[in-house]
Amino acid sequence: MPAAAPKLHLQDLTRRFTIKGRSVEALAGVSLTIAAGEFLAIVGPSGCGKTTLLRIVAGLETATGGTVEVAREPGSTRPVNAMVFQQESVFPWMSVRDNAAFGLKARRIPRRERHAMVQPILEIAGLKGFEDALPYQLSGGMKQRVALARAFANDPEILLMDEPFAALDEQTKLILQAELLRIWETSGKTVLYVTHSIDEAIALADRILVMSARPGRVKELIDVASVFPRPRDVAAVKSSPHYGEMFGRIWGQLRDEVLAAAKEQERAA
């Protein structure tokens, strides 16, 4: 099969903050190309700029230097991106159906039409029968299913995810990882997925971007898809003998960066 066309290109991306008169460099010269339909996971030590990178791509922050280029689909009227956050981001006064359809409502799609559009996504996300439920009636895992459904229903060209399952228990996390893969494989969307979990990155991604300690740089890009091809089963990946080898390789890249980040935090304390 021919290689997919580039969807997102980052060139020499930098980001600096000023904190109490002191300049802090969060990102330093990040250059990266993500293919259309690729699932890229981003791992790195705390404070390395993973979320900052995602927010710049989302347009929620402005880079100090460098460029972000998105190859838009010709004639597309779809949103460029949608973001799924770690914390619960559902509206407590809206039903599951209306939460999932919120982006469509913002695009002024009529009520009957947007409800018809979100119903298949709700069913794929395992929310059939809960369409009229309010968030207080849902578990944490189900609320994250609603957030996923809302992101996919709005049909963005790029999906940005910032540790969406970090607050969930391991059993729920495994189920939602499998659900995410199932929805993503039917949608073909380009995904950037920030996580602290090495095993989550291996289970989900085509490639893994390993970032250095602050200022965040590209330390290594690891090809997962050549070892674990699609379609992929999360449980099968984690029981494979190749899983341990890949985990060790990634942790070998991260260990020194995590220690360096911890020392930097001690100096700043």
Image (cartoon, rainbow, N blue to C red):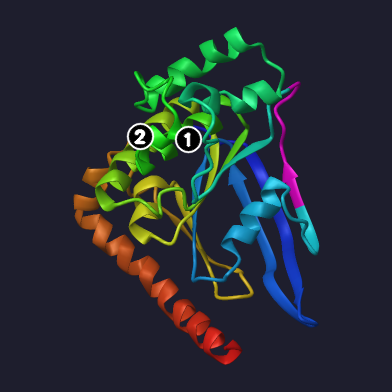
**Which portion, as a residue range, is magenta?**
68-76
Residue at 45% from the left image edge and 22% from the top image edge? 121
Comparing labels 2 and 1, the label whose residue is closer to the camera: 1
Identify the residue position indicated by label 1 in the image: 148
Q: Are marks 2 and 1 in contact (CB under 8 Å)?
A: yes
Q: Is residue 86 above or below residue 66?
A: above
Q: Position of residue 227 (x, y in %)?
A: 33, 49
* Magenta portion: prevailing SS class: loop
Tell me the quarter of the picture where residue 135 sits: top left
Tell me the quarter of the picture where residue 143 sits: top left
Farthest top residue in view: 112
Q: Position of residue 172 (x, y in %)?
A: 29, 44
Asked whether, in this view, residue 188 is left or right of residue 234, the answer is right
Mark 2 element type: helix
69 in the magenta segment:
yes
Q: Is residue 144 visible?
A: yes
Farthest bottom residue in view: 267
Q: Is residue 260 above or below residue 62?
A: below
At label 1, counting other C-alpha atoms closer than 10 Å, the crowd grade (few under 14, some 14-19, many 20 or more) is many
Mark 1 element type: helix
Residue at 36% from the left image edge and 53% from the top image edge? 200
The tag on residue 252 is none
CA distance for labels 2 and 1: 10 Å
Q: Nearer the viewer, residue 138 or 265?
A: 138
Asked whether, in this view, residue 33 is left or right of residue 98, the answer is right
Identify the residue position indicated by label 2 in the image: 179
Residue at 53% from the left image edge and 28% from the top image edge? 94
